[in-house]
Structures are given as structure tokens and as C-alpha cells.
Image (cartoon, rainbow, N blue to C red):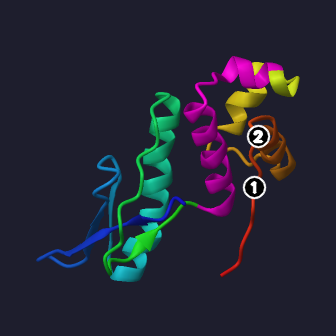
Amino acid sequence: MFDYPVILEAQPEGGFVVTFADVPEAITQGEDEDEALLCAVDALETALSLYVEARRPLPSPSAADGRPTVCPSALECAKLGVYQAMTEQGIRKAELARRLGWHLPQVDRLFDLKHASRFDQIEAAARVLGRKIEVRIS
């Protein structure tokens, strides 16, 4: 769902720069392809957190077309999925807090991608939005 294709560019001085056509705010680099792709996860999570903080819709990933892809960690994907459902339904954080019976700071932490939220809280938020979280190992 949040699997974004990357553009890996070898640099003349060595190393690789990673950019995302769909998330232009995310840019990073690494000494080799593996390191660059590992750094790309953090760059992507940081950039997507900027969308959440600004209450902007999340960009949709384009087709990979043979390019490598990067996605946030499973916990961050779950949080982003709940955020996306909330924005698609036009629900604000205060309304989500009311539906959950939570205080607003709890909802703020739920959408903080660097906060280690409990998975059951993310599931509860998805449920009140009429969604469910599915976990797959592929």
C-alpha cells in the first residue's frame, strides 16, 4: 500500500543518491545500493511524517516499472493507513479522539511515526473509521 519506487543514481564521486518521484521531499544517499536503500526507508518515513504534520493527503505510489521499492516499517504503514482513512473520510483528529474516547494528545502520538504506539490502539482507530488492519508476510 505504501510501497514507493525509488530512483537510484550512481554518483561520480562514489555512492548512490536515492530520490522518490512520488515523494520529492525524501532524498538520501548511501555508499552502496544496499546502504542507500536502507537509508531510503528513514528518508521516506521522515518525508511522509511531514505530510501527516501538515494534514496533507499522502501521495500515492506510482508503478514500480522494474525499479526497486521502499516502504515504511509495518507499524508506520498501519499508522499511515489509519491517517489516510481519516483524511479520506474528512475526519479531523478531534473527532477521532471523541469516537475513541481518548484525549487529543493520544491521537497526536498515534500519528507520530517516531512514537512506538501500541498496535491495539492503531487497530482501535481503524475500527472506528470502519476499517481493519491486515498483516501479511510475503
Q: Which residues are drawn in magenta?
A: 73-98
The part of the image, by quadrant, that contains residue 84 is top right
Residue 99 lies left or right of residue 2; in this view the side is: right
Q: Residues within 10 Å of mark 2 (few under 14, many from 20)?
A: few
In the rendered image, residue 120, in percent from the top left (x then y), is placed at 86, 49
What residue lies at 35% left-to-right and 72% top-to-bottom? 64
**Please, is residue 98 above or below residue 23 in the view?**
above
Q: Which mark is residue 1?
A: none
Q: Amino acid at mark 1?
A: Ile
Q: Which mark is residue 130?
A: 2
Residue 63 visible? The answer is yes
The part of the image, by quadrant, that contains residue 4 is bottom left
Q: Residue furthest left?
A: 12
What residue lies at 63% left-to-right and 53% top-to-bottom? 76
Tell me the element at label 2.
Answer: loop
**Please, is residue 100 above or below residue 39 in the view?**
above
Magenta residue check for 47: no
Q: Amino acid at mark 2?
A: Gly
Residue 114 visible? The answer is no
What residue lies at 63% left-to-right and 21% top-to-bottom? 92
Residue 7 lies left or right of residue 134; in this view the side is: left
In the rendered image, residue 1, in percent from the top left (x then y), is placed at 54, 60
Residue 74 lies left or right of residue 35; in this view the side is: right
Q: Quadrant of the C terminus?
A: bottom right
Q: Residues within 10 Å of mark 1 (few under 14, many from 20)?
A: some
Identify the residue under disc 1: 133
By secondary structure, the bulk of the magenta-drawn segment is best described as helix
What residue lies at 35% left-to-right and 81% top-to-bottom? 33
